[in-house]
Image (tube, rainbow, N blue to C red):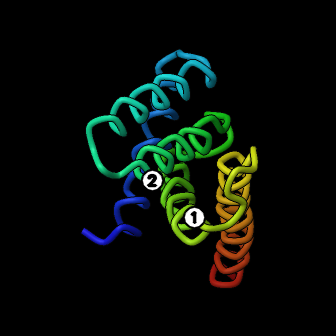
Amino acid sequence: MHQSLLLIIAGVIGSTITFSLQKAGLNAILSSAIIGLIAGLLSQYTSHSAFAAAMFCGSFVGMSSVNLMPLAAIAFAGGLSGLIFYYSQGILKGFGGKLGTIAFISVGVISIFLIFSKKYVVKLSKLFNR
């Protein structure tokens, strides 16, 4: 399987499981830590350490408030984080905060998309309901 697709899947897995654990009652930090532990263990038994890092990055996406975004939006943001992670693998090596920055950008992009798409849908519905 192509590495970019694997990293997108890893982001979706990390984000949706973290978000779901939050919805089940765990706090965001513990939810992300569980995914980080699982990803770390997976990296010991596979040759894809980037998969584990992308999954952990996705867990940062999943730390978003359960009251602000639906699960589908978190899944899209997680996939976007995996894609950004893929294209930024050679950038900022050795610097702290890369995964959090990727998660922030991913959630921000999806949030902006949701805000503008809702406004557009409302305008269209008003236009056609005249």
Label 1 sits on what residue type? Answer: Gln
Q: Residue furthest front?
A: 94
Q: Are marks 2 and 1 in contact (CB under 8 Å)?
A: yes
Residue 125, quarter of the rendered image: bottom right
The quadrant of the picture occupied by the C terminus is bottom right
The numbered mark, 2 or 1, whose residue comes first in the sequence reads 2
The residue lying at 46 percent from left, 30 percent from top is 35
Mark identifier at residue 89: 1
What residue do we see at 62% from left, 35% from top? 63
Q: Which residue occupies 65% across, 59% down?
A: 106
Instruction: Say which residue appears at 33% left-offset and 35% top-offset.
Output: 44
Q: Is residue 114 left or right of residue 37?
A: right
**How far, Cα to Cα, is label 2 from label 1?**
9 Å
Q: Position of residue 50 (x, y in %)?
A: 45, 53
Residue 12 coordinates in the image, percent (x, y): 43, 51
Amino acid at circle 2: Ala
Residue placed under numbered mark 2 in the picture: 50
